[in-house]
Image (tube, coloured by chain):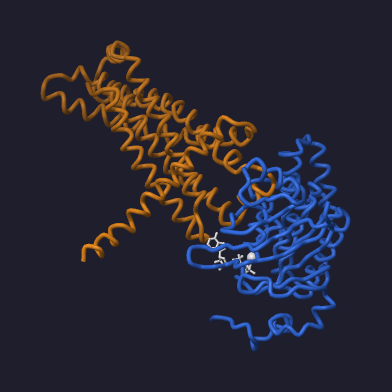
Amino acid sequence: MSDTKIKITDLHKAFGRKVVLDGVDLEIKKGESLVVIGGSGTGKSVLIKCIQGILTPDKGSILVDDEEVVGVSEKEKEKLHSKMGMLFQGGALFDSLSVWENVAFGLLENKKMDKKNAKMEAIRVLRQVGLAPDVADLSPSELSGGMQKRVGLARAIATRPEIIFFDEPTTGLDPIMSDVINGLIIESVKGLGATALTITHDMASARKIADRIAMLYKGKIIWQGTVKELDKTNNEYVRQFINGSSEGPIKVEV
Amino acid sequence: MIQKFLRKLGKPLVKFFSSLGELSIFVIRSVANCFMPPFYIRNFLRQVMDIGFYSLPVVGLTTIFAGMVIAIQSYSGFSRFGAESAVASVVLISVTRELAPVLSALMVAGRIGAAMAAEIGTMRVTEQIDALTTLSTNPYKYLITPRIVAAVIVLPLLVLIGDVIGIFGGYVVGVYQLGFNPANYIKSTIDNLEALDITTGVVKAAVFGFIIAVMGCYNGFKSKGGAQGVGDATTNAVVSSSILILIFNYIITGMFFSK
Ligand SMILES: Nc1ncnc2c1ncn2[C@@H]1O[C@H](COP(=O)(O)OP(=O)(O)OP(=O)(O)O)[C@@H](O)[C@H]1O
Ligand SMILES: [Mg+2]
């Protein structure tokens, strides 16, 4: 067994004429926390959705545990998903279900846990992300944005997945709440021994949770390295991005 | 010149056939999933309540007034031939064969088709459907199948209830407004009662239920682009299912009665 968890080779994805991913190569090791940074609309969410098989890439290969996932059957995708958890950019909580039913969804539907145990487990995970048990019976729409993120996080980790995806976990939160979420991500990933792929353009968050950082630009990974290497790099694109400057090689079309 | 014309013609044509293909694949997948476990009983029961129970007032009002109107119209029409005694059987036949199934289906299309498109469309644009997938749950089985099965089972029941209420509406007008003898009116209704009238209405209702659920789910499922996309999906669901109901009403009527 190699120690590579996910290996992406030459991944292409276009929507109509719009090329989003144009040859992405990326490797994530077991137990590693990789952060992908990049501007808005560069295809970070599309990249995650390709790995999960929600979108089908036009070309290229994605290996998870040395097994190809591009073009496999629905049945195998379901098996693949049972190893994965995902925190969605917009939360994507089921608004027809209560908070605890959201968190316990994977346990009830797939692990066939009975209702009572699933609810107890959901409350335990909610407490783990800092939410009181009385939140459990509320509806997601009654929660604040930060609380919804926490519930999303709880749902992502409740099935104890081997791989967890975080799509912009801190966007739209105040700096303190962001730091709380960062802490929770680190805790839950380390606690589960999971492999994590996080997408963000929040550099503070990236520095805190990353073992390694990769930058996506114009459909390709143009740089990758550790946080230490990030501060020393001469790559002008990366420097411009982390300094948040409008001047440099990256041109924003307005 | 000709090339330009063909190109103009081709684009919408290609679009039409590709969405027709998309719809067919959607229908096949949804139907196939009706027969494969897991079954989400709780979702199914919720739909039965939504489609069936909560539609009762609407269906009741629609059919009672339809029955009342048909009684007045046939009375005034048939009095020209001195055939007023046919009122009871005309009410019976028009309510069971046409009015109850078609009007109920159109009302339910407005109520339920729109709700399905809006709910599933919102789930699509807020990524809840992707979230289902990542939780190893097949969205067809979880969302679409319960709705289709519930609609196909419940609409015939609604129509049976509508039949009774519609005939009752005709009876009320016949007896209290047009002065028929109650016993004669009832006798004439029962004498003319034929199984075929009821069956065709029920068959129609099942088909209409399928159309409403499929168009509602399909339009919601493929909606994109935020609130506006969901709004469009809702409109499309209601318009397309209403038109399909009228077309299939003609086709089914033709299959049963044109000889
Ligand atoms: N289903 C889709 N159909 C058509 N175009 C899409 C679809 N999904 C994404 N795109 C396009 O792909 C591009 C990349 O989108 P994506 O959501 O991956 O951006 P992102 O990097 O996650 O940006 P952000 O940081 O704002 O979330 C966008 O231009 C978007 O318009
Ligand atoms: Mg994104």
Q: Nearer the viewer, residue B247 or A146?
A: B247
Whether residue B41 can be seen here: no
Asked whether, in this view, residue B90 is left or right of residue B51, the answer is left
Pick the residue in front: A55 or A207: A55
Q: Relative to residue A139, is residue B180 depicted above or below?
A: above
Position of residue A147 measured from the top left corner of the image (x, y, whole percent): 75, 59
The residue furthest front is A1
Residue B141: percent from the left, percent from the top?
59, 38
User: In the image, is A197 to the left or to the right of A216?
Assistant: right
In the rendering, at what x and y percent does residue B235 appear? 41, 51
Residue B163, quarter of picture: top left
How many discs mark residues in the rendered view?
0
* Residue under the image location 66 percent in, 66 percent down: A24
Q: Residue furthest right?
A: A191
Instruction: Judge whether residue A2 can be spotted in this image.
Output: yes
Q: Position of residue B92 (x, y in %)?
A: 30, 21
At 83% from the left and 42% from the top, the residue drawn is A120
Rendered hue of chain B is orange
Quadrant of image for the C terminus of chain A:
bottom right
- The tint chain A carries is blue
Q: Which of B13 and B224 lies nearest the eye of the viewer?
A: B13
Q: Residue at x 76, y 85 (%)?
A: A234
